[in-house]
Image: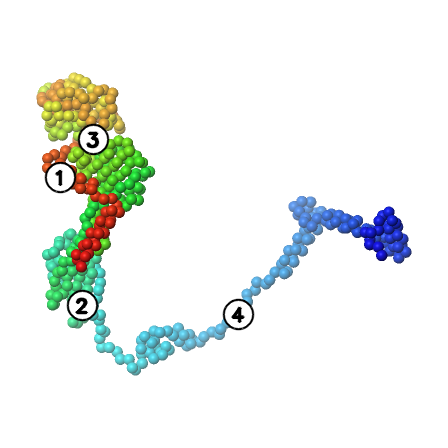
Amino acid sequence: MYQFNDIGAGQGGGAAALSLDRALGRRPIAPARERLRDFRARIEEVDLVVDLGVRIGSREWMRGFATCAALCYAAWSFAPGIEPLQGAVPAPMPDAQWEEARALSIAPLALGADTGRRMAPNEAVEALTDTPERPRIDLVATLGRGDSFARVLERAGVAEAEALTVAEIVSGAIAVDEVKPGTAVDISLGRRPNKAVPRPLEALTFRARFDLELAVERVNGALALKRIPIAVDDTPLRIQGRVGSSLYRAARAAGAPGKAIEAYLRAIATQISIGRIGADDEFDIIIEHRRAATGETETGKLLYAGLDRSRGDDVELMQWEYGGRAQWFEASGVGKSSGMLQRPVPGRVTSAFGKRRHPILGYTRMHKGMDFRAGHGTPILAAADGRVVRAGRAGGYGKQVRIKHEGGLVTSYSHMSRIAADSGNRVKKGEVIGYVGSTGLSTGPHLHYELYRNGVPINPASVKFTTRAELSGRDLANFKAQLLELKGVPVGGEAATRSAKADEKASDTIA
């Protein structure tokens, strides 16, 4: 036999196949390749995925719609059911069984029942004639603002007479006003002979001060006071760091309290503008710091404010009491308190702003400024930063200097003996611009000081001055000695290590 593909077209294979088909009464069979080609052509003519958005109503669209409907129906018909599955439902309980099931617990056994189904005690349980009370009660009372020690004890259950006795004992060791509000008082009450009287006080303990704890104990039937001193390390805390983008955030990140940073900024502002602090400047803060042997710590006021500037003069300030009040002094011993304007001379005011009788002209007229008494040649200081707009003689004012400041302010300094500023120059706050004299219409050496706002004279006394003070003699020596001691305080971790060693030594001493 011959393979179909082995019969070549030129060997009469096609004619032989045709005669064989005719002899058998069959239709001629086309070659396999032609039949496969025809099948593929017919398949390609049929579009299995019809776009139902176009040619709506055509035969192709109807065939596609029918196909889509058939597929949807097939999906719906083969989808599983969503009816709920029925489970076994227990039969409802009778009311008696429900009450019994609800009562089943360990509570009946705790009440003396012999089973969990009986709620009442059995005959083996006998009722007590009296309920026994606790032999000792420990509680904590808090001292409120404006509260008395006796009232705190009475609220805790101590008898009035005994509370007054304890308050008198405590007041002999420390004033109750020194105890901070919110202090916790640990109280122990003993057993009372009968329920008709309050419980007696057995002991109480509270933190009277940061370095002292007081205890009242009953010894041989009488209350006695016991002092418990607490060792405290008073080494100040020193914090340093780079200012960076924000001095406040940098100091907080270094561990400085918020109030100390605020005090530091106010102190630095007395010397330079806060806006002139650079990112490369380094701050130096020293504050009061106490660490108790029991582990508590507390911080106090700011002691030293330093600023190591990358550009400009460094700032070193220490708080010192002078003239009955504390103020900030530079390392040289010169200090000044905050204020808007610098006081031009240190003398007292001899004539205020307002109407007065002129000492030379002899009639009453408006006195537009203030007169300061000062000796001849006393330096006159600029009240604030500004530009000199006049420096020379001005009629009855004598030798005068006028300075224009920001905000529409102008200050005038008259009757000078000598002028130390030139017109057009810029001067800084506190800079010497002249010296006290008696030129013009003047009866003696003094400074006539005027203040204008937008061309209108105002009372200089309505504006707060910045006062200056300078230490000398023993005060200056003590100031520099304490400043040197503060600058010797170690920074951060060294201070903490030193405090920890002191605490260990104190604990060993107490033990």
> Could you tell me which residue is drawn at 20 percent across and 37 percent down?
317
The residue identified by callout 4 is 87
Q: From the viewer's perspective, is the residue at label 4 or at label 2 nearer?
A: 2
> Could you tell me which residue is drawn at 35 percent across and 74 percent down?
106
Q: Secondary structure at mark 4?
A: loop
Q: Secondary structure at mark 3?
A: strand
Which of the two labelled residues, at mark 4 and mark 3, occupies the earlier sequence position?
4
Quadrant into which the N terminus falls: bottom right
Quadrant in the picture for residue 489? top left
How far apart, in angstroms, are the residues tagged by discs 4 and 2?
64 Å
* CA neighbours of label 3 inside 10 A, class few (<14), some (14 to 19), many (20+): some
| Left or right: 494 in relation to 85 | left
Residue 318 image offset from top left, x and y in percent: 19, 39
Which of the two labelled residues, at mark 4 and mark 2, occupies the earlier sequence position?
4
The residue identified by callout 2 is 190
Which of the two labelled residues, at mark 3 and mark 2, occupies the earlier sequence position?
2
Residue 341 image offset from top left, x and y in percent: 20, 30
Q: Amino acid at mark 1?
A: Asn
Q: Are marks 2 and 1 in contact (CB under 8 Å)?
A: no
Which of the two labelled residues, at mark 2 and mark 1, occupies the earlier sequence position?
2
Q: Are marks 4 and 1 in contact (CB under 8 Å)?
A: no
